[in-house]
Image: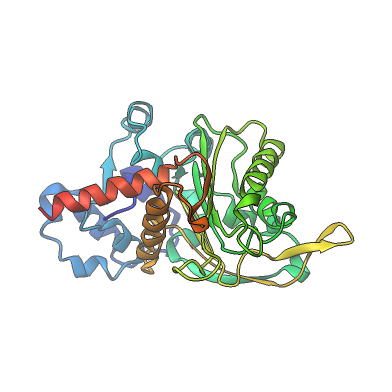
Amino acid sequence: MKHGSIYLQFGFWKNIKAAGKNIFGPNAWELFCALRSSQLRAEVPIELFGQDDFLSILWHESGGSCFIEDGQIDGIIRNKLSIDILSSVFLLDKSEKECNTIAKRNGILCLNADMMLRKKYLVTGHGFSYDFHQKGNYSDMKDFFQLPCNSLLLIDPYILNKDDYIKFHIKPLLINILPEEISIPFHISIFSGIGKCNDDKLGALFYDKINQMLKEIRPNLNCSLMLYQIPIQGEGWHDRYILTNNIMINATAGFDFFGPVKGVTCAKKIGSFKLSCPLLDKNNETDIYQIWINKTSQESRRKNDNDYHHKRWGTQVNRLFELSAELNEGSKMSSM
């Protein structure tokens, strides 16, 4: 299985080489030229690509990289706005303004060489900690958080323990991650326990409050929200993740970094995160990403029943669920 595709223009790589920045291995240019040639692709030993961080990402046995010519990108974006396109990365030989226009319109990651060089963490992937007692706000992490996106999953069993957690925990996260607007509906799915005792009677109230909060912080963003009640304990729901079509954030201690002090939001602990871009991944985080996409996708399709662990409010729609279904279908076909 793969997560979307990498659409790559020859000019992007040429500009990376011209910049003289050593973010790729010493043989990257020669290997890239060989990879780009359909005649030579099969003749290049795959182990050579493993010696280079970025080329090891581009070389997907599942066919994850797509080489495109200069004039193709506009037609691809305009005519093929599919689940695959909306979950892909575009590495282009275009101006930063043009890349940002494509990214902001569709919520997709679109970078030229200069932009990639400024966002090396997307290639290297790493964990990092923030002392919010010193920093005080998610906005200090905006370079990591504010990547284009069009779909989001928030998974945290305890982030809705109390009514005011919407204001003090969920709102600070979303206000720093959600785009101001995109040309398509933005899909948000939240998986959490409801109240300290998982009281499903609070679900509709919390759903309405989150919807109202979204309208306040993103009046120009058409949000499609789902709130899904999960067991507070058991069934493998103890991990905490934010997943978008472009980023995965794992907060092992949860996302409750802030709390009210005399009515004011204040930092209360050090924030420990592990962040990666699933498609530009070389640290085997993609498998974890897909596990959680599949898990939430399967749960979202459950029918509401008398089991309070599995109540749902709002839509079942999320592009990440659709991607999961597409990937699973492709996996079944390839095994036949």
Residue at point 68%, 36% (across, down)? 215
Please tell me whether residue 322 is drawn above or below residue 105 in the rendered image. Answer: below
Please tell me whether residue 21 is drawn above or below residue 70 in the rendered image. Answer: below
Residue at point 69%, 50% (across, down)? 171
Quadrant that contains the N terminus: bottom left
Residue 60: x and y in percent read: 25, 57
Q: Is residue 119 visible?
A: no
Nearer to the camera, 330 or 119 = 330
Residue 8 position by quadrant: top left
Q: How many marks?
A: 0
Residue 56: x and y in percent read: 29, 63
Q: Is residue 34 left or right of residue 8?
A: left
Q: Is residue 203 left or right of residue 301?
A: right
Determine the residue located farthest toward the right in the rendered image. 262
Residue at point 18%, 65% (across, down)? 46
Please tell me whether residue 246 is drawn above or below residue 267 in the rendered image. Answer: above
